[in-house]
Amino acid sequence: RTFVLPKEYVPFIDCFAQVEEENAEAKPHEKVPNLWIMKPAGSSRGRGIQVVNDVGCVHPGELTIIQQYISNPFLLGGYK
C-alpha cells in the first residue's frame, strides 16, 4: 500500500485505521505491524526517511511518499 501525501492523506488515514482495527480483532500471532515508511519526495541518499507507527507523526504539508512496511517481503532468488 502506497500513498502520495498530501493528495492521498485521507485514504492513508483510512488504511492506517483499518490495520489498527484488524489488529484489535486479531489473535496475537496474526497481528500485522502497523509500520509505515515515509520518504520525502525531494530528497536523495535516504535523507529524511522515517519509519512511523503513529499517525500523529505524519504531517501532510509537503510532498511525501508513504508506504506500508512489509515485514516478510516476497523474494526471488533471495532478492527483493
Image: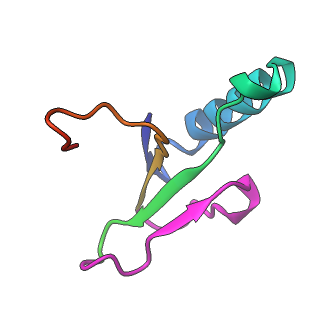
Residue 74 point in image, percent of width and height = 31, 31
Farthest residue toward the front?
78
Position of residue 66 measured from the top left corner of the image (x, y, whole percent): 46, 51
Judged left or right of residue 78, residue 23 is right
Q: Nearer the viewer, residue 64 or 47?
A: 47
**With respect to residue 6, does 13 lie above or below?**
above
Residue at 57% in and 59% down:
60
Which residue is at a point 68% across and 54% down the rendered structure image?
Answer: 53
Where does the image place residue 16, in percent across and percent down from the top left?
A: 66, 37
Q: Is residue 52 in the magenta section?
A: yes
Taking 66 as reference, is 41 left or right? Answer: left
> Is the magenta region chiefly helix, strand or loop?
loop
Q: Would you place residue 23 above or below residue 48 in this image?
A: above
User: Is 55 within the magenta?
Assistant: yes
From the top left corner, tell me how far across and down residue 68 is, in percent. 50, 42
Q: Which residues are magenta?
A: 44-63
Name the residue nearer the viewer: 60 or 45: 45
Question: In the displayed structure, does residue 10 sit left or right of residue 66?
Answer: right
Q: Residue at x 57, y 45 (%)?
A: 9
